[in-house]
Image (cartoon, rainbow, N blue to C red):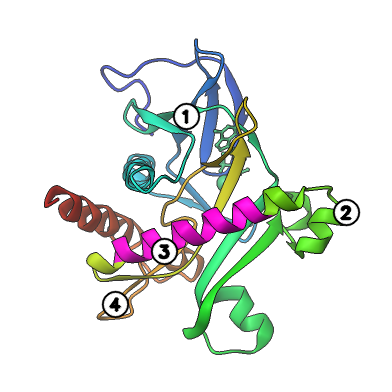
Amino acid sequence: MNLNHKGDKEYKEMLYEGKAKRIFKTPVAQEFFLEFKDSLTAFNALKKGSFENKGIVNRDIAALLFEYLEKFAIPSHYLRKENQNGMLVKKVTIIPFEVVVRNVLAGSTAKKLGIEEGTPLSEPLVEFYFKKDELGDPFVSEEQMRIIHQIPVRDIDIMKELALKINKKLTELFAEIKIKLVDFKVEFGKDSDSVILLADEITPDCCRLWDMETNEKLDKDRFRRDLGSVKESYESVLARLTQNRRGK
Ligand code: ADP
Ligand code: MG
């Protein structure tokens, strides 16, 4: 991790250390410093790894994608890049449900349903998973969210609508760089005015990205499945995105 890199600001009060990021207090009450770590985990942290500069690469990808989505009126917690591997974000109260959008069936869902990985879906599918490591982030129905967890229908509808809009814009962006957006996971949170914002991160850690020409995987499945070239794949996603944006 590139801590104490020349010119980096020092944030001393850490509020939370997760599997891939750390959150720090800042002098501004409504802002957090979100630091991207070099570590990589899979299968609910049973498998652990890391690669050099992962934090920088993921921070750059997340910043670029948040900036891109902002142009299409998708509100996020992102404020600006800070230090080598971090960003300043708006403090939110995370809604503890991961929102997954699938365009193509892959991973555990394909396996669970006995459908071949790579089978395209007739329309994007939105799913919710209860964010609880101890339980392995189980799938929940919208009815379970509403009745058991007391999540207002309005909030569920906003998250779904935003997730589909994010999917549409990201699918378009990745298509420009010849990458297929197979699926992804996002998190939402409420700011101090109770506005629902896209939070956390969008990076190859939480997306499935397949090269359109070769079908090569360019995401965390390279780590999960020991396919090698994890670092190179993440770097190539960033390089392709950066080159593409430069031409605009
Ligand atoms: P985890 O191991 O829980 O996935 P991460 O390593 O992803 O944790 O660390 C980021 C944590 O910070 C996540 O739990 C995420 O929900 C939370 N988070 C992300 N953005 C914000 C924000 N703007 N305000 C508050 N919490 C946030
Ligand atoms: Mg996380």
Residue picked out by circle 4? 212
Work out whether mark 2 precedes mark 3 in sequence or the reverse, and give the earlier one. Answer: 2
Tag 1 and tag 3, C-beta contact below 8 Å: no
Specify whether tag 1 is near ligand 1 (CB below 8 Å).
yes
The reply to whether residue 68 is in sight is: yes
Q: Image height check: is 108 above or below 100?
A: below
Residue picked out by circle 1? 89
Residue picked out by circle 2? 148
Front residue of this view, candidates 234 and 224: 234
* Numbered circles on residues, count: 4
Residue picked out by circle 3? 168
Mark 2 is on which residue type?
Answer: Ile
Work out whether mark 2 precedes mark 1 in sequence or the reverse, and give the earlier one. Answer: 1
Q: Which residues are magenta?
A: 157-174
Give the foreground label among 2 and 1. Answer: 2
Q: CA distance from mark 1 to mark 3?
A: 24 Å
Work out whether mark 4 precedes mark 3 in sequence or the reverse, and give the earlier one. Answer: 3
Front residue of this view, candidates 94 and 211: 94
Query: Overall secondary structure of the magenta stretch?
Result: helix
Q: CA distance from mark 4 to mark 2?
A: 41 Å
Specify whether tag 2 is near ligand 1 (CB below 8 Å).
no
Specify whether tag 4 is near ligand 2 (CB below 8 Å).
no
Residue 36 percent across, percent down from the top left? 44, 37
Mark 4 is on which residue type?
Answer: Met
Q: CA distance from mark 2 to mark 1?
A: 30 Å
Q: At x 45% / y 62%, what residue is drawn?
A: 167
Q: At x 21% / y 54%, what residue is drawn?
A: 239
Q: At x 84% / y 47%, what residue is drawn?
A: 150
Where on the picture, by quarter, is residue 230? Answer: bottom left
Mark 3 is on which residue type?
Answer: Lys
